Image: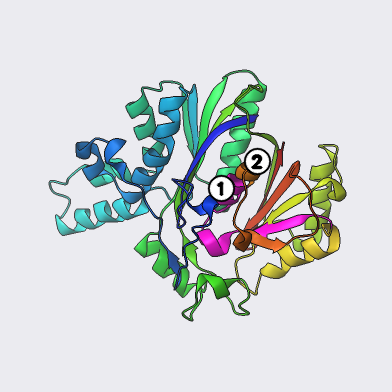
Amino acid sequence: MYITDSTCISPQRTFDHSFLDGDVQRNQGVRYSAIEPNYGQLIPAGLLRRMGKAVRMGVGAGLPLIQKTPVDGIILGTANGGLEDCLRFLNQIVDYKEGTLTPTNFVQSTPNAIAGNLALMSKTTGYNITHVHKGLAFEAALLDALLLLQENQLKTLLVGSVEEISDYNHNIDSLAGAFKTEDISSEELLSSDSPGSVNGEGSAMFVMESGRTDRTIARVVDVFQSSYLPESELEGAIFAFLERNGLTARDIDTLFLGVSGDNRTDHIYKNLNVNFFTDSNCYWFKHLAGDHPTASSFAFWLAVQLLAGKSIPDVCIYRHAQDRQPKNILIYNHFKGTQHGFILLGK
């Protein structure tokens, strides 16, 4: 599966690539809000006014790609979709005692609303699906796309992820201890020694094709996902994943790790790096985009930029082992220490 184009909306200025030029945003606190572009040239005002934030970001990231490259299908991953609109609709049911309700919040709140809006606005009538699998939603979308393209059922797909910060979910996760209790800056996050991380949001979209063309910038080699994988079995799972693709740990020149500043689970990443990938250049990313169920899509976007020959800011560097041109990139991320995903990208 080959990547030909990409866009990203995140808490960094990634949509216009200012981030790649060194414009790194410093965030404070435990909520990293996405920096949204001006949607006026992309989405008609009448539609934009009715869109929730998740739908807005997904359409804003995906529509420019589809306008340049018509696709045969759309595959997205999200943990919650437009949850804020869903809660507004549920509150209306109570407030109006199940009387006359506005349908807008209901229509825009379902997880597949983003993929549906993209299809309607681009007149894409082919395969359309949204995977809702918490911390493995993006990996599930990639795996679905891999299978479809390998079977030659379709030629070109839009694959991506969307996540928004919902006040309701943020409060629940805060009470469950998912986020820091102290006020902390993004520059201090990964060196902190305390429980919890920070919340993030955004959307990353990619055009993927079944064959290599002159527009190809990277290749998705393989994807692995597992829920409730014991830490003791993680090493075996990674080596089995690499072996089935004809690689060893030494062949991985670039490693992206989802280090989040949470001292309860970050040791999983750090032990993996120290024990098995000492020759790899290592990057981290959650101090830039926050931690959310589909945060691996931000790392995926960064990895694609490296394979496309672009440079990413030094603030992404966890450990620079040696000067090696990116050829085999491994992304490893887990969600709350229970859902584990590996993504292998090639030149």
* Residue 147, position as x, y percentages in the image: 64, 28
Q: Which mark is residue 297?
A: 1
User: Which x, y percent locates residue 205?
Assistant: 50, 39
Q: Is residue 210 left or right of residue 7?
A: right
Say which residue appears at 54% left-offset and 70% top-offset.
197
Colour logic: rainbow
Amino acid marked by disc 2: Gly
Quarter of the rendering containing residue 66: top left
Nearest-to-viewer mark from 1 and 2: 2
Q: Residue at x 21, y 42 (%)?
A: 103
- Is residue 283 rendered to the left or right of residue 135? right
Does residue 177 show up? yes
Q: Residue at x 41, y 33 (%)?
A: 64
SS at circle 1 = helix
Residue 34 or residue 23, whichever sits in front: 23
What x and y, as percent, mark residue 198?
A: 50, 68
180 in relation to 346, above or below: below
Q: Amino acid at mark 1?
A: Ser
**x then y, percent, for residue 38:** 31, 46
- Residue that numbered label 2 is attached to: 309
